[in-house]
Structures are given as structure tokens and as C-alpha cells.
Image (cartoon, rainbow, N blue to C red):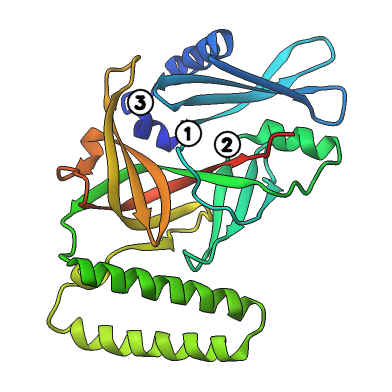
Amino acid sequence: MHKFMRAIGFSKLTDRREQQRLITDIILNATHRSYTSNGGETILAEFCEDFAKDMGIAVCGEFDESDKFTYDYFYPYLRGTGISSGEDVSVERHADKESYAGVCDDIKVGVSLIFYLQNMVPYVKAQNEDMLPIRGTTLTLSGLSLGGNILLPISKNEKQVQKIQKASRNRNQLIAAARKGDEDAIESLTLEDMDTYTSISRKILTEDVFSLVDTYFMPYGVECDQYSVMGEILDITLRTNKLTGEEIYVMHLNCNDLEFDVCINKQDLYGEPQVGRRFKGTIWLQGYINYPSV
């Protein structure tokens, strides 16, 4: 059983027979279907069914030469909104099955974003037609969470907000220059990090860490596509799983200037989410590569 099923409203789905019936129903009544050749005599297929707006379950497998479908695996998904990043994305196949991980180096975050690729069929099709790499792509990220907390925002006036935004822009410019080998930029970033460390080490003795750290985005655990995040809530909706009746919060977050959607089961969220407050929790990061129209 996929452990992130409860994030989209299937917290009570524990029986294997119920799971198999659900998978069969998705294959027969999918709202989205996509197919492509996997380079041999078989056809790669993905069946998706939404159980609330923009969230559901994808079932993946293959059709053989006799048109018989063999189920391989399934996963829950949340389709994000908007553009999270315009940086180039590289994709690698997982070792155990026909699924893919994407990697995006976005300077806003400071770490390489590794995510589970949602639209693998267009990628496999482009790969088989020798169209890679495709330039001009954008990335839409989303996350599924099994537990989180709502924190109050850090009080900031307009002048402080503008100062923070200016410092963020300057840091991004320095990081971009450092990537190109600019030694002055590397030295400036090193000194800035040392000053930040010294300042926080002094303040942490008398202040709470979450009053000093506004947002963060950092790897979590041993799986490369799971992260611990804290970000400002920009928008929030409450959706209902049409099959189970469970309620799911979908929050649009700003985390280190990276915007993406996160869904969490209402019963797994501690606190009352509101625009302007902060969400803190762990997520399974997914991504959808937006290919330019030809």
C-alpha cells in the first residue's frame, strides 16, 4: 500500500482486496489515459482518475502484443498550479520500475530539487523519438504530506519586506555568478554565510528558532524526493474526496521564493490554516514538466 494514499483522502484503505478493486475501477473508468511505445513490442500505459479537483491515483502498466494489460504499480498525485521553476530539468529512470525522477537545480532553493515525475509518458515518447533535450521547458511542482503544523507568521513591516526581497535578489545573483566561477561572488557568499551563522548563534540563545527562520526547504530522511519544508501560505482550498468523503487541504506555498502546492488530509494537519500563516511539515515532492507547444 502506498503510504501517501492518506494524503489524498484514502486513510482507511488498508485491505489489499479493496485496493485491487480500486485499481480495476481506475483502469476501466479513468478520466485521463495516455499511451506510448516503450521501444519494444509493448505499449506503456497510464490511467489516471481524479477523486477531487487535480488529485487522484495513477495506475501504470503495459499492453503486450496480444493487447493484454499488465498492471505494474500505482501512485497518488496532486497536480500543481502555476510555474515553480524555469530552470532546465534532467530526468533519470528508477532502477526497479518504469518510473522516473527529475532533477532541477534552482538557485532560489540552494539544493538540487529531486522529484517524482508525474507526466512520464510524454517524456518516454520524446525519448523514443530522439527529441531530447527539449529546451524551453518549465516545471510545476506539488507535494503530498502525511503530517504538518500551522505556525503564525513573523511580523514584518513593509520596509522589512522590501529589504528581505532585495537581499534575496542579490543573493540569487551572487549564486548565479558563483556557478560561472566568479571568485569574488564565491568569497562574498562565504562571508555572508559566516555572518548569518554568527548572528543566528547569538540570537538563538534568547529567541525561538521559528521566529528567526521564516522559511526553509531541506532534504528529509533517506529517500531523495522527500523534503522537510516551511513556507508561507499564499492560498488555501478545502476539497473532498468524492469516494471516501474525507476532506483535504490544498495549500499554495511560498518557500524560499519557490511556489508550489501541497495537499494534506485535514485530520493530519495540526492548527488552522489561513493565508499569511506558515505551514511546516514533510512532503513527497512531485513534478510535472511543461513542454513547449510545437
What is the crowding at mark 3: few (fewer than 14 residues within 10 Å), some, or many (at least 20)? some
The tag earlier along the polypeptide, 2 or 1, is 1
Whether residue 72 is situated above or below residue 98 in the rendered picture: above
The residue that disc 3 covers is: 10
* 185 with respect to 215 (left or right): right
Question: Seen in the image, is 251 located left or right of residue 98?
Answer: left
Q: Which percent across, then down, holds residue 53?
A: 39, 24
Q: CA distance from mark 3 to mark 2?
A: 19 Å
Density class for disc 1 (Cα within 10 Å; few <14, some 14-19, many ≥20) is many
Mark 1 and mark 3 residues within 8 Å of each other at the beta carbon = no
Question: Is 241 situated above or below 93?
Answer: above
The type of residue carrying mark 2 is: Gln
Viewport quadrant of the C terminus: top right
Residue holding disc 1: 79
Whether tag 2 and tag 1 are in contact, CB under 8 A, the answer is: yes
The residue sitting at 42% across, 46% down in the picture is 260
Query: Quadrant of residue 280 in the image?
Result: bottom left
**Residue 36: x %, y % from top left:** 76, 25
Q: Residue 277 location, x and y as percent?
A: 20, 52
Type of amino acid under label 3? Phe
Q: Residue, x 51% and y 10% (percent of image)?
A: 25
Q: Secondary structure at mark 2?
A: loop
Residue to which mark 2 is pinned: 118
For the residue pair 72 and 247, the one nearer the viewer reads as 247
Query: What is the count of numbered marks?
Result: 3
Q: Which mark is residue 279?
A: none
